[in-house]
Image (spheres, rainbow, N blue to C red):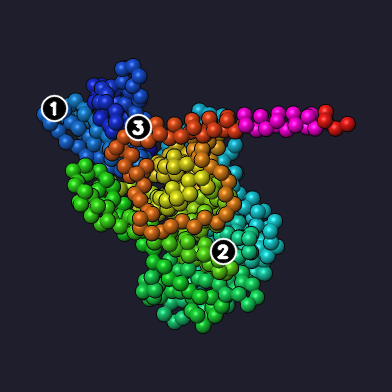
Amino acid sequence: MEFAELIKTPRVDNVVLHRPFYPAVEGTLCLTGHHLILSSRQDNTEELWLLHSNIDAIDKRFVGSVGTIIIKCKDFRIIQLDIPGMEECLNIASSIEALSTLDSITLMYPFFYRPMFEVIEDGWHSFLPEQGFELCSSATSEWRLSYVNKEFAVCPSYPPIVTVPKSIDDEALRKVATFRHGGRFPVLSYYHKKNGMVIMRSGQPLTGTNGRRCKEDEKLINATLRAGKRGYIIDTRSLNVAQQTRAKGGGFEQEAHYPQWRRIHKSIERYHILQESLIKLVEACNDQTHNMDRWLSKLEASNWLTHIKEILTTACLAAQCIDREGASILIHGTEGTDSTLQVTSLAQIILEPRSRTIRGFEALIEREWLQAGHPFQQRCAQSAYCNTKQKWEAPVFLLFLDCVWQILRQFPCSFEFNENFLIMLFEHAYASQFGTFLGNNESERCKLKLQQKTMSLWSWVNQPSELSKFTNPLFEANNLVIWPSVAPQSLPLWEGIFLRWNRSSKYLDEAYEEMVNIIEYNKELQAKVNILRRQLAELETEDGMQESP
């Protein structure tokens, strides 16, 4: 298919653009296969370049011969275009609708994008499973890399290489895979060097109504326990939901077959409930007519902050089991690709200082989201404005980033990255020139040949010139476990995401710049103090030598 077939009117003059915090701009609107571009001949006017894949919904209206298109973006921005001529307006609208809903992944912009920067690091090879395993194997010899899923035959949503207990062979893993949802047998997520405890993750066991068991599964997860120790299974569903899944062949671990494990149910919502929550929240944030009572009731009705609290509470529980109870844990929900990953990755941010650095956090996203099979293509296909209801969309990754921001806000000096880093990741998960978040798992990415045909997001982010934008000036390495508060008063709305198009950040930006200047000035003064101390020490040494006979 040629993009030209979908572009009925490629160019329109005298279009007026209205967008938040900018004066209205008149210019020429151009449609390409992947971008909507508005450029003006006025001096000092920034061009608008909008990826079609960032468009969530469009509305049209007409007053006389002037048509207005309102574009609602996946990053929650709302843009208005006033287009002279009804026919041109209708043509532009239908072209945008067609170009923003392309079915084929290979027609998306990452397959056509060519970087304008020098590629110093190939991000596709920055965070390989072997590298993660090296960190674990330096502390223990109880684990091994398994290539049982080499052709994605055992589990289509797992990577080709996984870390499993050394005492369990590949044949046993194949048997366990038939007993776990989607073939997702228990694998290592995190090894806590302080006490040797581990976090494992998997899909639900397929016990069904007959209470089916799998001795290889029992042996696998028992292999993670120390002698005389108990473990915890954290199920991210309520007991009621978990029991209902037995009728469909799913279920949970029976105490009789897993006597050394204590099961805890922590209900984390999923799918359409989360999507509806996001829609309600963004709608409340965009309505400027609310009085205080109405705003607060709409914020509460969205339940967004309740979901944040549920996820963070479960992550804190997981971290507590590891660090304070000295117990290993297995985490799963139903599939093990959504709430499971939220909890495993947040627990690591609480426990592991490396995960709070820029590269450590990138590695965490690679390992616990991309390689672990979070279906980004399905979950991020639509955002808060889309009119057509799909079954699989859910802001699972955005909720995770929001939880990270909550912890960052409570521990502002413990993270090497800043809020802009988290916002950038949200934007690229929904619409990007890079191939990192395309596809639903490693198997799909392999078939699409993304490593050969697209650029990795990390190749761009990890350039020194870009990293400086995402570095937290307050960062001081903190090797301790950090325990976030989950009290309702401690969990505010993330304004940097949800209100950034509704109120100007001018004063916040100025305050941030002033803070950076103060920190730099403090460093200069500290350097001068150190020089003066050295000079004083040298003078005292000289005086001592002169006084001695």
Q: Is residue 164 magenta?
A: no
Q: Which residues are magenta?
A: 528-545
Which image quadrant for residue 273? bottom left
Which residue does the numbered mark 2 point to in the structure image? 323
SS for dot 1: loop
Q: Residue at x 21, y 29 (%)?
A: 82
The label on residue 495 is: none
Residue type at mark 2 is Asp
User: Label 1 belongs to which residue?
Assistant: 65
Q: What residue is at 11 percent from the left and 29 percent from the top?
A: 64
Secondary structure beneath dot 3 equals helix
Q: Earlier in the sequence, mark 3 or mark 1?
A: 1
Residue 86 point in image, percent of width and height:
17, 29
Alpha-carbon neighbours of circle 1 within 10 Å: few (<14), some, or many (≥20)?
Answer: few
Return the residue nearer the eye: 205 or 360: 360
Tell me the quadrant of the picture where the N terminus can be found: top left
Label 3, label 1: how far apart the Cα atoms are: 37 Å
- Observer-side mark, 3 or 1, equals 3
Please report the residue visible at 29 percent of the width from the left and 31 percent of the height from the top.
21
The residue shown at (48%, 49%) is 411
Front residue of this view, candidates 125 and 442:
125
Indicate whether residue 543 is drawn in magenta: yes
What residue type is disc 1 on?
Answer: Ser
Q: Which residue type carries mark 3?
A: Lys
